[in-house]
Image (spheres, coloured by chain):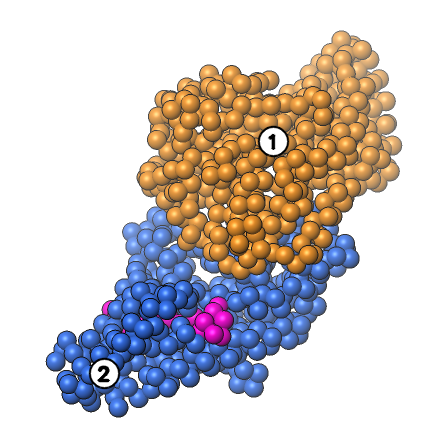
Chain colours: A blue, B orange
Amino acid sequence: MSYQEMTKEELQEERNKVAAKYEELKAMGLKLDMSRGKPNTEQLDISMGMIDTLTDYNLVGEQGVDCRNYGVLDGIIEAKRLLSAMIECPVENIIIYGNSSLNVMYDTVARSMTHGVMGSTPWCKLDKVKFLCPVPGYDRHFAITEFFGIEMINIPMNEDGPNMDLVEKYVSEDASVKGIWCVPKYSNPSGITYSDEVVRRFANLKPAAEDFRIYWDNAYCIHHLYEDDQDHILEILEECEKAGNPDMVFKFCSTSKVTFPGSGIAAISASKANLDFIKKQLSIQTIGHDKVNQLRHARFFGDFNGMIEHMKKHAEIIRPKFEAVLNTLDKELGNMGIATWTKPKGGYFISLNTMDGCAKKTVQLASEAGVVMTPAGATYPYGKDPHDSNIRIAPTYPSPEELTQACEIFVTCVKLASLDKLLKNM
Amino acid sequence: MSYQEMTKEELQEERNKVAAKYEELKAMGLKLDMSRGKPNTEQLDISMGMIDTLTDYNLVGEQGVDCRNYGVLDGIIEAKRLLSAMIECPVENIIIYGNSSLNVMYDTVARSMTHGVMGSTPWCKLDKVKFLCPVPGYDRHFAITEFFGIEMINIPMNEDGPNMDLVEKYVSEDASVKGIWCVPKYSNPSGITYSDEVVRRFANLKPAAEDFRIYWDNAYCIHHLYEDDQDHILEILEECEKAGNPDMVFKFCSTSKVTFPGSGIAAISASKANLDFIKKQLSIQTIGHDKVNQLRHARFFGDFNGMIEHMKKHAEIIRPKFEAVLNTLDKELGNMGIATWTKPKGGYFISLNTMDGCAKKTVQLASEAGVVMTPAGATYPYGKDPHDSNIRIAPTYPSPEELTQACEIFVTCVKLASLDKLLKNM
């Protein structure tokens, strides 16, 4: 029976039961973590072949580059080929970076602050710079823009992507809007994928600012959970070109959740004009990124097909975890009228919405019972969820047993927080 | 006989001989490179053990960190211990970065532009920011400050370091002077090492600007050529602390010329207050650097002694090259009155000064005869050597045979350029 339909007495009785259950779980003194999109040990193990990949001692790339020495600012051809296949762009439209796409995004914003975008006024010289932030979204994106004092504007997410009416309005009317953070596929945290119409509307934006860019973080582009039921997105670089906006997008990706997080390779993909501007700065910043690691990745996978096969192994490991969480949510919170959640076909997260005003309380209760969740509010700019309702669930890191326990505690906390709210309002 | 003592006729005769020799060498159609401080293949080979270091598949660090996964923003303890021994600082006073100390320096300046230094006004909000640049110096340092529009002021180098009277004057009188670029040991390009007195005067600076920092790029700290004749410098962090200026210095280092350039690990060392400020930004910029590579380095060397032994192998390979260049310079240009040069005991460069106005011409002649040198002027801010006299010689990359040929061409070019100048002035 839905909590909404219960009488005060029934709610009180239910609360007593749930509270007792909560105390029981809490007394187990567990220490579990569903807070971050971290691969688990089993996933890391499938990349251990990376360790042996170069033991033939041949570190010369196919273009004759000794990958051990200085040089090759924008990446060796093998790595460009691999990641351009991954991010779906021509091999000419990519720069290979170091281990972190987050760092590439940070650098992209930092460069815009001090040097503008393709010749525009540096943002640090402007009174106001704004970014659109589809919500719920990725906390580390918001942290970058907050760090640079960029004002963030919430854009609600629909089931097929951001509310494009709002996006179009802001972008075309306000020249201080310089960017929008997007995770277009298996979005963080909702897991939704942008529809073709949404992508086309992005590509056809008419920005008031010449230095407006779409920050297209395709972090989960090949992170499917199911072999026979995958999301696809239109390729934005090509769509922008078709729409006469060839320079309007920066695409980012990395192998962080493909091989070893922290020891992968990252990339930016954009128009030639954008890349030329970026390379000017890059040539000041470094002599080059880690080419040995680029070669290691290229040799380990052989080609993009090798990467696709590799991703199937990841899916084998994490799919049951997603399903376990979703099953528990269905069983314990289904038809209760107190929470809704997404059922992603890929990526690293499930997004759950409690009743308004219950997210912080739920996360706090979980924490006190030994389950670390992403802080409530983290999926919103400035950590402020206006409804205090969104919670990001990251099911990949715990073991299946831990996950079962963590889910049991979590749903109990959702119930307890909801019951307290319903009782208080009576 | 010195060219200075020759009559016009003698000079003309000598010119004919040198020009004939030059044409003869040019006709060989060689392609040689003495332009960059790049290790040669033989040097890279001594680090090939890096490829096997982790093949026991144990990627868990001694503090229980799974180096394959996310986390550990400032570096694993093994890497901190290794590089803090290298850069001579307490293990608490270091952050381990990615593959490039140049990138760390770039980020340090970039952060100061947008966020100031430990709470000071961001430099992008100031009308004028200046850096002192001991000359001749490292072109990539100057490129960073030029890129950010920072005005660079030449400080002449003496045999024991920069002219400290000038440094003290600028730093204490001008609050827009925010930094000074230093390569304190086996300096780039002169190879000189700062004396204890110079280091102490640095540590005792009384800056007009609270956000003034010494940018201490200790790139060649362990890069000795001789086992029994090594330079030592006072440890600047400790000297600054003694002098009551604990926050005044950033130290940088990397393993780029220890293991594989481009695939090494880099670090910054500074006071706790500086590092705390830096870490705030770093936590926005990345989740962490490549810990697998950190572990690879730590395991490969075992400890700092392993690194010292490793550096002896480098010295074995490059010492004869330095000596070959110096011998040729002595033999061909000694007592000619047309050039002076340094005799470094470590590092990667020999610095040669032609007569005023002859450097560009010499480098051009060499280029036309197939020998690439660092562009004349590159060792000065804005690429402008006021005397057009300094040339940086990088002897490490060519093979011994190539080096002999390159030197022969180079000294011929020095002679030819000098003769032309002397004849023109008659």
Residue at (75% x, 42% y) in the render = B46
- Examine the image and state in which quarter residue A343 appears: bottom left
Residue at disc 1, secondary structure = loop
Q: Which residue is mark 2?
A: A14
The residue tagged 1 is B221
In the image, B322 versus A173, the foreground residue is B322
- Specify whether residue B280 is in view: yes
The subunit carrying tag 2 is A
How packed is label 1: few (under 14 Cα within 10 Å), some, or many (20 or more)? many
Q: Is residue A365 left or right of residue A31?
A: left
Where does the magenta region start and end? A386-403
Up/down of A166 relative to B127, above or below: below
Residue shown at 47% from the left, 37% from the top? B93
Magenta-drawn stretch contains B162: no
From this view, report whether residue A119 is shown above or below residue A330: above
Q: How many marks?
A: 2
To the question of a shared chain for discs 1 and 2, the answer is no
Identity, as a three-letter code, of the amino acid under mark 2: Glu
Tell me which chain the residue with mark 1 is part of.
Answer: B
User: In the figure, is residue A369 to the left or right of A275?
Assistant: left
Q: Position of residue B184 (x, y in %)?
A: 56, 27
Q: Quadrant of the N terminus of chain B?
A: top right
Whole-angstrom CA distance, mark 1 to mark 2, is 69 Å
Q: Is residue A210 visible?
A: no
**What residue appears at the point 29 percent right and 68 percent down from the top-left corner?**
A365
Q: Is residue A57 above or below residue A259?
A: above
